[in-house]
């Protein structure tokens, strides 16, 4: 586990070490930085090379200044209507974090009374070609299969002329919660009508979806596969229609004798249609859970609270309090119903089963 970007740092250092082992360089100087961390500088080698290293370091600093300037948007007119926004691709995440940014932008548009639809430009730096997509296949995949498709779920459109618009560099839900508490409605994602109709025809009896996280990135965040499999069999024995939704890389791979939905693993709009069709959608803390958070779908998301000194900040009380706006371990997103909640526990079989029955019991009381 580690901070965002730590894997890239390790790869860079491994490449640096391989080069150093060639024995052609006699001096090393470097700097590592991280959020909420003291910078870590390192240097050493042949003393006669220190002056050359300092000279090269100044050149490197000038180059980094130029890179940063290219990724910083020029000043703009703040009176532009709030239906025009742009996403700063060079420095912004290409992930489901875009859901918070998009919901915030649509919420701002509605509060400001700007016309619909929300128009979104994807800004590629002052040079018009700095996206980071070419150098990082994962970012490119997330851009095409998550970021851009999310626009259609909220009624937004891509419009390259909106680069003159607003850009808020914040990617969590804190401000959305604050505005909701002030009395403003939270926008909701909705699947395209044709896909929703097709999914309901495919599952005339509302299924329970079990969305697995099975990524090689931060594997400690992955689903407890054995527990989810056992829970799936438990639900199936109770007469529920169970559908496993696998990670994109395993979309076509089966899970025992359960139904899977490869379309939902591969296409965001089909995924949203499946979640809207479901009786319940169950997640660990991962990106797809945000589709439940900003929708009318029933959902449960399992997350074990950690201490503030935990190595992965998004699993800490401080992060949830300051960035998300929810008190970890006890709080909930304020617009959510009893069948839409964070379960502050690890995803063990017993916890999955207990949370399931807690929701079902409340539903029985509600309809009695």
Image (cartoon, helix red, strand yellow):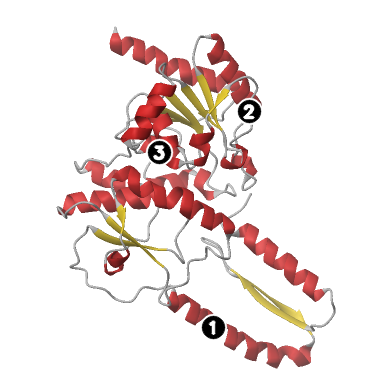
SS category of the residue bearing label 3: helix
Q: Give the camera-side residue of 307 and 50.
A: 50
Q: Is residue 243 above or below residue 155?
A: above
Q: Spatial distance from mark 3 to mark 2, Cα to Cα?
A: 23 Å
**Number of marks present in the image shown:** 3
Tell me which residue sits at (50%, 52%) in the image: 142
Q: Is residue 308 visible?
A: yes
User: Where in the figure is residue 312, as x and y percent of width and height?
Assistant: 57, 48
212 lies above or below 10 = above
| Labels 1 and 3: the sequence-earlier one | 1
Residue denoted by label 3: 291
User: What's the residue at 76%, 83% (across, down)?
Assistant: 27
**Callout 3: 10 Å neighbours few (<14), some, many (20+)?**
many
Q: Is residue 337 above or below residue 263?
A: above
Q: Position of residue 86 (x, y in %)?
A: 33, 63
Q: Earlier in the sequence, mark 3 or mark 2?
A: 2
SS at mark 2 in the image: loop
Q: Mark 1 highlights which residue?
A: 63
How far is the residue under mark 2 from the one under mark 1? 49 Å
Q: Residue furthest left?
A: 113
Q: Position of residue 236 (x, y in %)?
A: 55, 13
The image shows residue 239 at horizontal and vertical percentages of 50, 9
Q: Which residue is mark 2?
A: 254
Mark 1, residues whose alpha carbon is within 10 Å: few (<14), some, or many (≥20)? few
Which one is in front in this view, the residue at disc 2 or the one at disc 1?
2
* Residue nearer the viewer, 16 or 157: 157
Quadrant in which residue 326 is drawn: top left
- The residue drawn where x is 44% and y is 61% is 92
């Amino acid at each position: 586990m580690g901070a965002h970007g730590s894997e890239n740092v390790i790869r860079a250092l491994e490449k640096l070490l391989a080069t150093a082992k060639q024995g052609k360089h006699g001096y090393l100087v470097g700097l590592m930085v991280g959020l909420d961390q003291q910078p870590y500088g390192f240097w050493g080698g042949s003393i006669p090379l220190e002056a050359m290293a300092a000279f090269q370091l100044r050149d490197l600093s000038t180059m980094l200044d130029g890179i940063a300037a290219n990724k910083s948007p020029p000043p703009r007119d703040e009176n532009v209507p709030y239906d025009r926004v742009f996403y700063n691709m060079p420095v912004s995440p290409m992930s489901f974090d875009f859901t918070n940014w998009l919901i915030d932008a649509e919420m701002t548009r509605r509060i400001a009374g700007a016309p619909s639809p929300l128009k979104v430009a994807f800004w590629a730096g002052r040079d018009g070609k700095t996206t980071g997509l070419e150098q990082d296949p994962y970012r490119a995949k997330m851009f095409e299969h998550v970021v851009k498709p999310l626009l259609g779920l909220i009624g937004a459109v891509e419009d390259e002329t909106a680069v003159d618009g607003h850009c808020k560099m914040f990617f969590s839900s804190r401000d959305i919660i604050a505005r909701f508490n002030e009395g403003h409605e939270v926008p909701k994602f909705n699947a395209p009508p044709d896909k929703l109709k097709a999914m309901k025809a495919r599952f005339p009896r509302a299924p329970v979806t079990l969305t697995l996280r099975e990524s090689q990135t931060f594997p400690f965040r992955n689903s407890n596969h054995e527990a989810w499999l056992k829970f799936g069999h438990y639900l199936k024995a109770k007469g529920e229609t169970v559908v496993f939704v696998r990670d994109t890389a395993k979309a076509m791979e089966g899970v025992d004798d359960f139904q899977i939905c490869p379309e939902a693993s591969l296409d965001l709009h089909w995924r949203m249609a499946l979640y809207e069709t479901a009786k319940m959608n169950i997640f660990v803390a991962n990106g797809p859970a945000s589709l439940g958070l900003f929708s009318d779908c029933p959902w449960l998301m399992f997350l074990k609270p950690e201490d503030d000194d935990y190595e992965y900040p998004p699993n800490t009380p401080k992060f949830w309090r300051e960035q998300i706006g929810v008190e970890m371990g006890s709080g909930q997103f304020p617009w959510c119903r009893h069948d839409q909640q964070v379960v502050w526990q690890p995803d063990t079989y017993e916890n999955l089963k207990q949370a399931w029955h807690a929701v079902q019991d409340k539903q029985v009381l509600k309809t009695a």
